[in-house]
Image: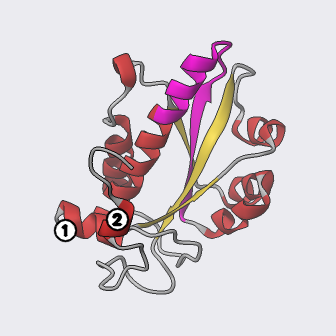
Amino acid sequence: MDTWDAITSRRQVRSFTDQPIPEGVLGRILDGARLSPSGSNRQPWDFVVVRDPEQKERLSAVWRGAAFTADAACVVAMVQPIVDDEARELMNRFDVGQAALQLAVVAADERVGSGLAACRDQDLAREVLGLPEDRFVAILVALGYPADRPMEPIKSLDRRPLDEVVRFDRW
């Protein structure tokens, strides 16, 4: 799949088949996230891949909108350090967001679906994942093969027209 096809295939997947993701495919997806750009090359992320069904079930309770993650082939917890500096916190979140998007696009390129979720209950996440106290889960990314339809370019995206979204030089 080329880059444009991967971008137009990418969608929020919340229903997965029980097909496992081959190790080589998962490795490429994770490597895509690892290679994401990062301000000053800080790379403020660690990834915890959860495949155990009981762990996925428990982890899915960290946010009311994360229940779908329990049925994914795996869940990638994108972990970042807790910092005292507000500016650094914002930069770290931006960097982890870029890594999450890059992970999702590489997954789409591999025809693997992804669904992103927030993590509100950090204590539960820390317990399930065994995180140290100086880390937190910024984003959960469920990965798996979509149950509804394959990862293919969407012909008619429900998006605002480009000329309605883009302005040049001034508002």
Looking at the figure, which quarter contains the N terminus?
bottom left
Place residue 31 in its image quadrant: top left
Q: Position of residue 105 (x, y in %)?
A: 34, 57
The colour scheme of the drawn protein is: secondary structure
Amino acid, disc 2: Ala
Spatial separation of the CA atoms under disc 1 and disc 2: 9 Å
Residue located 66% across and 21% down the image: 82
Position of 28 relative to 64 (above/below): above
- Camera-side residue of 33 and 90: 90
Sequence-first tag of 1 and 2: 1
Secondary structure state at the residue bearing disc 2: helix
Residue 110 is at least partly visible in this image: no
- Camera-side residue of 58 and 93: 93
Q: Position of residue 159 (x, y in %)?
A: 42, 74
Residue beneath label 2, please? 108
Amino acid, disc 1: Met
Place residue 37 in its image quadrant: top left
Q: Which residues are magenta?
A: 73-94
Left or right for 145, reference 111: right
Residue 159 is at least partly visible in this image: yes
Residue located 47% across and 67% down the image: 20
Position of 82 relative to 166 (above/below): above
Residue located 73% across and 65% down the image: 67
Q: Is residue 134 magenta?
A: no
Residue beneath label 1, please? 1
How dense is the environment of label 1, judged by Cα within 10 Å: few (below 14), some, or many (20 and up)?
Answer: some
